[in-house]
Amino acid sequence: MNLVVETNIELNPQDSVQGRVLSLDEHVTVRLTSHSTNVTNRSKSIAELLESLNFSVDAQAKALAKSLVAYNIPLNAENLESLLNYASAFDIESNLSPNLITTAWLLKLPPQSHLISALQLVFEQRRSFVNELQHLKNSLDLLLKNLPKGINSSLINQILQFVSLNPNDADFADQISQFMNQLGLGYEAKLLALLNSPESIQEFSKNTNRNLKVLLLRLNLQVKDSLAENGLRNAVRRNLSQTIEAIEQVFASIDSHEIARNRDIINGGQFYLQIPLDYDDKHLTAEILGRSDSSDEIDLENFQLQMVIETENLGTLKVNLHVLHRDMICAILTEDLSYNSFIEREKGNLLSRMKALNYNLEDIHLQVVDKGKIGIDMIPITAASQSDLVRVDVSA
């Protein structure tokens, strides 16, 4: 006998379902009823499970137990006790979410790690990386005007080159790739891997002069040494303190980009990147969500970029750019099909702008089609850790 069941019940891990046979005629009719379609029943089942494991049923234990279930981690006494002990090491006023604490536990991050603040950015996206770079630029501009002894002005000028990109430049596409590669992602891990080889460290150091994180590490040491000097004027001391704060914020954002690119945090090898732009004297932000088969860099011969653009007159546009060798497909999805006629009308202007950026128009075919004809699903941003990952934590 073949049993076919159709249902629209939304089920969650640990939910229980009751099945009742209603008919045994030519077709078998079954009614399924979920016992856990509301929060009260789910909480009750978690509470019963905690009691069976001899744990006190308090708010924190229930929240962390639900988080383990959400991440498909076995909910047993060993895992729950380990997670509760880990959570107890955090300051109660930190207000970290149970999912964040669980992810940090899975990544084996020390509770006092500087990467906890980076993980917060991944989960909450509370700050703009572009705004942090602008804040850093403002602090460094002030520092250059009244530079204390011991701080290298050329080092500051090197850092300032990272603050913004110009989309009018012919090599703008290369700038985006360079921006990501030169942030300093994975710097500490690569350095640790070379500790037993002084020659390799020396060679590695030669290639880090265009690495934003390395440059900021050097400047951070110089600023802290200068701040320790006696006799500094209040204005200089205040600016040095603001510079350290700005550097620490950028550090956290760089680390958050690295964490977000980890395959065990973001499903499918996705990465999220904010890129600062200067366009017609306006400070703008390009927010890019992409996927890469490489954990170290983007393959410029085979990659996808997906962008969500808020416009004043056309609503939200979703852009999918797929590059495979010499072929480039750019799909623009609009909220309303009526906007397609406008895009069709203006595509000549778009092609002219692409030509100004030195794209070979012979390689480009621009066509406006309905969403159903291109079959593109925009990548959702997810945060899910599904394996036990060991992470080396090196505090700067």
Image: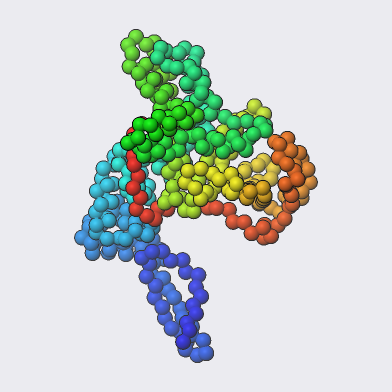
Quarter that holds the C terminus: top left
Residue 38 or 166: which is nearer the viewer?
A: 166
Q: Residue 250, image x and y in percent?
A: 45, 32
Q: Is residue 165 left or right of residue 5?
A: right
The number of callouts visible is 0
Q: Quadrant of the rendered structure where residue 40 is?
A: bottom left
Q: Residue furthest front?
A: 199
Q: Quadrant of the rendered structure where residue 256 is?
A: top left
Q: Residue 257, image x and y in percent?
A: 46, 41
Residue 109 at least partly seen: yes
Q: Residue 298, image x and y in percent?
A: 54, 44
**Residue drawn 36% across and 39% down?**
193
Q: Residue 119, image x and y in percent?
A: 40, 42
**Residue drawn 30% across and 41% down?**
110
20 w.r.t. 308: above or below = below
Colouring used for the render: rainbow
Q: Residue furthest left?
A: 54
Residue 135 at least partly seen: no
**Residue drawn 24% across and 57% down?**
78
Q: Residue furthest bottom?
A: 25
**Residue drawn 36% across and 21% down?**
224
